[in-house]
Image: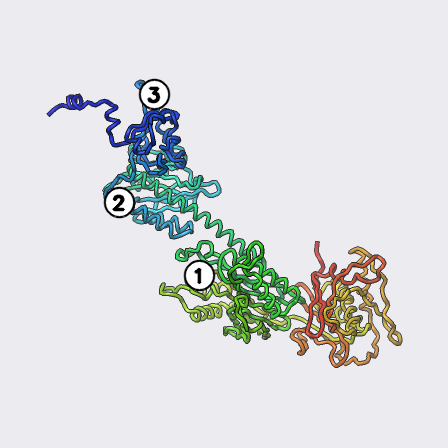
Amino acid sequence: MTTWGEAAFDAYLPADTVLGQADIGVVVADRLGHLLFLNEYGTRLFRIPGDASGLAGSSLQSAGLFAGDDLRKMEDVAGQVLRGRSWEGTFEAARGDGSRALMRALAVPLRRPGGDIDGMVILAREASNRDGQLQQDRIALLERVGERLAGSLEIGTTLKHVAEMLVPQFADHCFIDLFQGGQLIRRVMRHARNWVPPPGTWAEVGQQIHYPKGHFCQQAMARLDTIVVTDLDIDPYPAPSAESMAAAHAAGLTSVVAAPLHARGELLGVMSLALSRLTDREERNYGAADRDLIGAIAGRVAVAIDNSMLFETERQTALAFQKSLLPQVIPDLDGLEVACRYVPAKPLEMQGQGIQTQVGGDWYDIIPLAAGRVGIVIGDVEGRGARAAAIMGQLRAALRAFAQDEKSPADIMRKLDDWCRSLAPADEAGVPLAGDPPTASCIYMIYDAWSRELTFANAGHDAPLMISGGQSRQLEFQYKGVLLGVRGKGIRGLPTYKEQTILVPPGAILVFYTDGLTDRRTRADGSGHYTEAEAVEMLQQAVRAAAASGDADAVATAAEFAVPGDIDDDMAIMVVKSSPSGLASIWRSFPAEPIMVSEARRLAAQTFGSWGMDAEQIDLACLLVSEVVTNAVLHASITPSPGGELYFDLDPVITTAPAGPLRSPERVPARPRGRAAAVKAAARSARTATMPVQDAAVPGWDDPDPMAPLDPMAPLDPMGPGTPAVGRAGRREFALRLRRGANSVWVEVFDPDLRLPRIRTAAETDEGGRGLYLVEQLATRWGSRPTPEGKAVWFEMPRSGYRP
């Protein structure tokens, strides 16, 4: 047996022979990263064309030893080695033939005889050349991690899947910390055997964490490289706190590895794993091979997290966009209590439709109309995603515009149907493309809280539930109607939209909902889905029980959670409760004669006084009553002219107590300009209007005494739903209707003229033309609408004066 010295001398080979025959690439570079030497095997490994000696002096990157994507890693390797440390890991090389390959490398310092570091030596070989059962198991683990990461775009689910895959198979402890608003926040913490660290030691999920300088997580983020601490007993590290270090000792941590989560040029956070004595493992320390595996897993996790963040941003944007298109505040309504819910579908992994699984085209709306009436609408645009939400917003805006014009529900459905059919896909030049226009279901209702009449038209939407007297049932639609836009699909001969009117009982509750509430809800035991009939039955039971409280918001909450299981479509819920008590209202018909202007003012003054209205508001309201009544007196005797527009240019007629035969009404000269002058004139006009009037024989007067005691629940004329009839039996009449709400009063004047008034600008020398301007300035709101027998002009006034 020879000694070591003898064997070494006998086997001595020149350095050139060793470097030329060894099956490993040897790369030598100076401190600046310039290539000094590349052996023969390295030339073949990196597939350098031609004579490799010509590369001497060029940079490692230009020589193709490091791919451009790994340039940052090359800088980190050089920085670490030139400080006297070795580096072992994997990098990507750009070969001379244009291909890329993963290289397993060991980099060590190149020292002079005096000990100074003059460069570095890199020993490299292809990483794929390694084999063995352990390597196969780790590749399989990496593939499973990739599969789990690809199964979800929700960041919480993504992080949970990562921790479940790594603990306890590959680690006893898993931590994932992500940056949020410049702060590092712990997002995941998982331990083997359900071990829980003592309170106040390790940062909890959702808490901010600070890693001190020199901590392996801090180094991983600073270097953008995976850091392995093979043995914590040999290589101690600074802990965030003394309590944290004590918990680490209590758990028996033996080895840790930290990898930065870096994607698309941005540092997202850090992932760290640890081995401890919580489990019975043969190997309690991480090594170089583990470093590569964790680095590869961290790379995939970083991309998955980045995709999840992008997805979450898009989801929140789409959701905010959808919610911005819904009513932000439900207005206070007389005779109605309203509660609404909008619930987006949760991100379901099996759908694989990304953002389109989050939001849709469900919407609801409450629209204040003339004289306290309310428009109620709920609808659902077919499809999901931002396009459905955008179409929903356009539909809602169009419907509100049609509703403000006081169109009937059936007319509005027809207009919306035409509008949907006009949205067929087209190119930039407007040329129609292949594809169908959007379709939507919708119900539009007009509710009059004083008469309790509900008039509606339906476009293929599910019937709402009505809860009254402890019973719940679906409203029966005489005319269900077809979906909006379905005629644009080439279907002919479909019925048109028709209206239906019902009376809503006092205290009744209406529950409107979209099909996301009842369609395809997963059974509690996971065996398929509930049928729609089962879902509706559960909904009826839930809202019927909640209706006992009499609270619309409680009913809405009960409806939201009535059917168990995740929803795969967004849903909208709207609950409307009618007032259990009646609202004060009175109306009278008058002959269309000038003297009746003062009678109408006197009726209004007495009514407003009995309703507790402020005296100043009574004066202003009576002035406006004079304006609209005078117009009605003039035009009630004119033959209706369809399609015309009325110039509201009459001044109020001021009558005094007649001593004998009725005199011609006196016309007031042009009003003073300015709001203050207008208010003073209004007060003077109202005082004159409410002076006692002597009884006068009025031919044809056969209505009840207008000064008789007021009946706040006086019934409406049966000739029109919610609208007094005027001009019957050959007489020309106008009608005055007064309504009281919680904070406002409404005045409506009906006459048989079909022409609607509009504001016009009066010249300085005109005696008229300022009446409607005064109504617009002094009233909260005003408007006009057609009726079956003519038109109605209305305005709203607050019951108390404005307060500074």
Disc 1 to disc 2, how far (Cα)? 41 Å
Query: Which residue extends farthest front?
Result: 50
Q: Secondary structure at mark 1?
A: loop
Q: Amino acid at mark 3?
A: Asp
Q: Earlier in the sequence, mark 1 or mark 2?
A: 2
**Spot occupied by residue 472 in the image (x, y as percentages of width and height):** 50, 73
Among numbered discs 3 and 1, the one appearing first in the sequence: 3
From this view, report whether residue 750 is shown above or below residue 289: below
Q: Secondary structure at mark 3?
A: loop
Q: Amino acid at mark 1?
A: Ile
In front of the other: 49 or 397: 49
Which residue lies under the disc numbered 3? 116
Q: Which residue is mark 2?
A: 136
Comparing marks 3 and 2, which lies closer to the viewer? 2
- Check the image and tell me how it is coloured: rainbow
User: Please, what is the three-letter code of the amino acid marked with disc 2?
Assistant: Gln
